[in-house]
Image (spheres, rainbow, N blue to C red):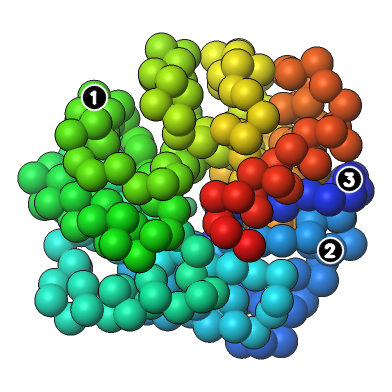
Amino acid sequence: MPAERIDGLIDAHTHLASAKARTKEEVDAIVARAVEAGVERICTVGDGLEEAELALQAAHFNERVVAACAIHPTRAQELDDGARSRLTEMAADPRCVAVGETGIDTYWLEHDPERTAPLEVQEEALRWHIDLAVQSGKALMIHNREGDAELMRILADAPRPEHVILHCFSSPIEVAREALDRGYVLSFAGNVTFKRNDFLREAAALAPAGQYLVETDAPYMTPEPFRGARNEPAFIGHTAKVIAEARGADVTQVAQEIGETFSQVYGV
Ligand SMILES: [Zn+2]
Ligand SMILES: [Zn+2]
């Protein structure tokens, strides 16, 4: 099934390095496929120090790409002094537009604690990344997997970055309301298209213009019609269409709104 073309789209959160796009040629190729599908700009995310370096490199390779750099909460124990000083340098790079993804992930604590960092280590890392976002003036990009209560508590009592993005927003509607009240941006991924997720379409309908984005989180989280295929930025059109339907809006209007939000939160 070919991706459907909608002009003016963006992908607010993707992992080019995990999709094996590392060299300039590989980055340019995946961006060219995205452009074919109408995707004009992409934010690529590094979730460890090596991936963060690759994300920043990709943003220097291709003018349509910007980067977000951080250590993922499941790898929070990797945030040692060396990582902190390198991430601080990266955040100062004009091609780095966000500090992320950082946040809280309790899923693996329950299912396989070996695969993640203890909660107190995650919280300490999150607070360090929040401070970096505030100091560098970059957006804070949050990952949250089954950590609503901890996350909302920490964000409320920490210093406030100018822009807070809740990437792959997957929380209940009450959390969406609270997050929107606080001025955060909800970024919707392929799971907003899943049949059972009416609550996510409800959140997408609730968010005012300026407070919602769309992302692939590729190569993970493939949207409904492409499930089974490896996800990439070119597949974002269907997710944008589902968001437009939920909002009762035209998809070109939605594309324009998310494009403006992308410019605003990432400062590009
Ligand atoms: Zn994530
Ligand atoms: Zn991600």
Task: Determine the residue positioned at 52% across, 68% down.
Answer: 67
Residue 167, compared with residue 90, is above or below; it is above
Q: Position of residue 203 (x, y in %)?
A: 56, 19
**Disc 2 packing (10 Å; few <14; some 14–19; many ≥20):** many
> Residue 267's quadrant in the figure?
bottom right
Q: Position of residue 254 (x, y in %)?
A: 78, 34
The amino acid at mark 1 is Ala
Earlier residue among tags 2 and 1 = 2
Numbered badge on residue 17: none
| Residue 215 visible in rendering | yes
Numbered badge on residue 6: 3
> Residue 41's quadrant in the figure?
bottom right
Looking at the picture, tell me which residue is in the foreground, 102 or 231: 102
Q: Are marks 2 and 1 in contact (CB under 8 Å)?
A: no
Q: CA distance from mark 2 to mark 1?
A: 38 Å
> Residue 16's quadrant in the figure?
bottom right
Q: Secondary structure at mark 3?
A: loop
Q: CA distance from mark 2 to mark 3?
A: 10 Å
User: Mark 1 sits on what residue?
Assistant: 149
The C terminus sits in image quarter:
bottom right
User: Mark 2 sits on what residue?
Assistant: 35
